[in-house]
Amino acid sequence: MKKWNVAAIRASKGVEKLGCCTAYDACFARLADEAGVPIILVGDSMGMTVLGYETTLPVMMEQTLSAVAAVSRSVKEALVVGDLPFGSYQCGEDDAMKNAVACLKAGADAVKLEGASDRVISLIKRMTEAGIPVLAHVGMMPQCVNAYGGFKRQGKTREEAQAVIRDARRVAEAGAFAVTLECVPAELAAHITADLKIPTIGIGAGGVCDAQWLVMHDLLGLNENPPKFVKKYAELAGIVRNAFRAYVAEVKSGAFPG
């Protein structure tokens, strides 16, 4: 299998559905890559899964670059996407461009950013014109959690749904090679998927999208209280906890080292 690239992701629409996930370090990125995961997102979800914050907002650009570098060094086939954290593209186009360039220099194949405001659309155009592939994100946007008053499903009313449709069209027209649809009704996601020529990647958006995201810690059962839409493909939290417990007990008893 050759390395996944933007052209291959675009060409997958209507041909095959892609199961994509996050990773934040070399070990898990290598395992996901070897398993055939086509897109690995170095997500700002690391704020909650790895760094212990309640939201994604505190994640710093330096932390993203460090994680992108670790992931990209161990991935051979997957497309690595660096998730631009809050503040890295909201404070002016020039700084946003510098941060996107830094992400690619750290090893990412593309960057992801949230929203479809005029400012973000201008950024998507400028980045793609500069040769920086962009994966867009509409619907529920975690970086807007304070504006929402919590992690709340979007697109529930007719007016909200029309706004999400408009946003999806705008990012596609601006040059995004794919768009994440997060926490929107399945019917809305199906409409957008049929409407756009670029792939949609759903997370909590039903099964009609061209691809799916799962956060690695949810997929593996390391997060014991995941969102309702998550399916656990393993129950690693208990296994890991028991391994630590057995180690502590054996050291205490003298069984280890033997």
Image (cartoon, grey):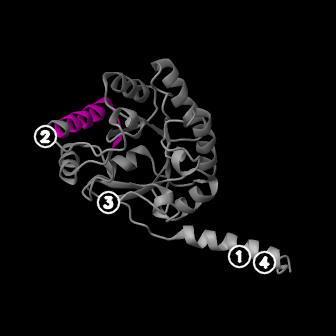
Label 2: which secondary element:
helix
N-term mark: 3 or 2: 3
Q: Position of residue 36 (x, y in %)?
A: 48, 62
N-term mark: 2 or 1: 2
Mark 1 lies on residue: 246
Q: Look at the numbered discs 2 and 1 and tell me whether their residues touch, using CB distance below 8 Å.
A: no
- Neighbour class for label 1 at 10 Å: few (<14), some, many (≥20)? few
Q: Which residues are magenta?
A: 161-180
Alpha carbon separation for disc pair 2 and 1: 54 Å
Q: Mark 3 or 2, which is nearer the eye?
A: 2
Q: Nearer the viewer, residue 177 or 207?
A: 207
Overall secondary structure of the magenta section: helix
Q: Position of residue 14 (x, y in %)?
A: 26, 55
Mark 3 lies on residue: 16
N-term mark: 3 or 4: 3
Mark 4 lies on residue: 250
Is residue 236 part of the magenta span, yes or no? no
The amino acid on which the numbered mark 4 sits, given as a three-letter code, is Glu
The amino acid on which the numbered mark 1 sits, given as a three-letter code, is Ala
Q: Quadrant of the C terminus?
A: bottom right
Alpha carbon separation for disc pair 4 and 2: 60 Å
